[in-house]
Image: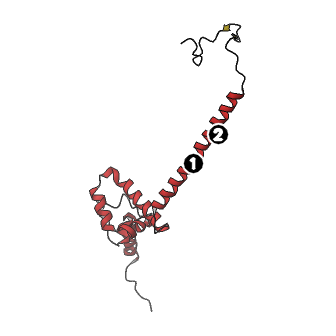
Amino acid sequence: MFIKPYLSLDCFEIFMNRFHKMTSTRCAVCKYFRRRCPPDCIFAPYFPNNDPQKFTCVHRFYGASNIGKMLEEMPVHLRADAIDSLYYEAKCRIQDPVYGCVGIISSLHQQIQIAQSQLAKAQAELSFLDANLAAAEPTPSHSEPLVQPNGAVDHGLDDPLNTWFY
């Protein structure tokens, strides 16, 4: 026995086209809550439908209504950076539930301190080697005039370290 389909093929194609348009234009938040995405959806620019993980991660820690309130209160030019920051903080909290991004910040601060101490140690060694090199070089006596490469004689009067005439 032949069963008549509920929808004709043309109606089915129209339905699928409308369904595809509805699902492809919804942001990740509206997809998550299975609702229609309004044209003025505050979440759409920051949670695109091709990255649902971004919203689920942020929603897990902050909640959709809190995110919406933050976005409404914030100037438009700062919203994208704020959402990126919330997403980064949420990912860090998932990776390290106790410290979150504070753990990363303290680790980086510790690395900076280690690098600064190594730099100070290297600079001290360089100044020590420079001092030893200067002490090992023979210095001409001040009573003898110095002969310049061009043949001129320098009597040491231009030397700022020689203070005998002040």
Sequence-first tag of 2 and 1: 1
| Residue placed under numbered mark 1 in the picture | 115
> Is 115 rendered above or below residue 27?
above
Say if mark 2 contacts mark 1, CB within 8 Å: no
Q: Give the quadrant of residue 80.
A: bottom left
Q: Which element is circle 2 on? A: helix
| Residue placed under numbered mark 2 in the picture | 125
Badge 1 density bin: few <14, some 14–19, many ≥20, Cα 10 Å:
few
> Is 129 rendered above or below residue 115?
above
Q: Give the quadrant of residue 160.
A: top right
Note whether residue 14 is visible.
no
Note whether residue 3 is visible.
yes
Indicate the amino acid at tag 1.
Ala
Farthest-out residue, bottom: 1
Task: State the residue at coordinates (31%, 65%).
Answer: 66
Task: State the residue at coordinates (34%, 68%).
Answer: 63
Task: State the residue at coordinates (34%, 61%).
Answer: 43
Depth-wise, is mark 2 or mark 1 nearer the camera? 2
Distance from disc 2 to disc 1, alpha carbons, whole Å, reads 15 Å
Q: Position of residue 16 (x, y in %)?
A: 40, 72
> Is 119 rendered above or below residue 81?
above
Farthest-out residue, top: 152
Q: Position of residue 64 (x, y in %)?
A: 33, 67
Indicate the amino acid at tag 2.
Glu
Task: State the residue at coordinates (39%, 73%).
Answer: 10
- Quick one: 25 or 126, which is closer to the camera? 126
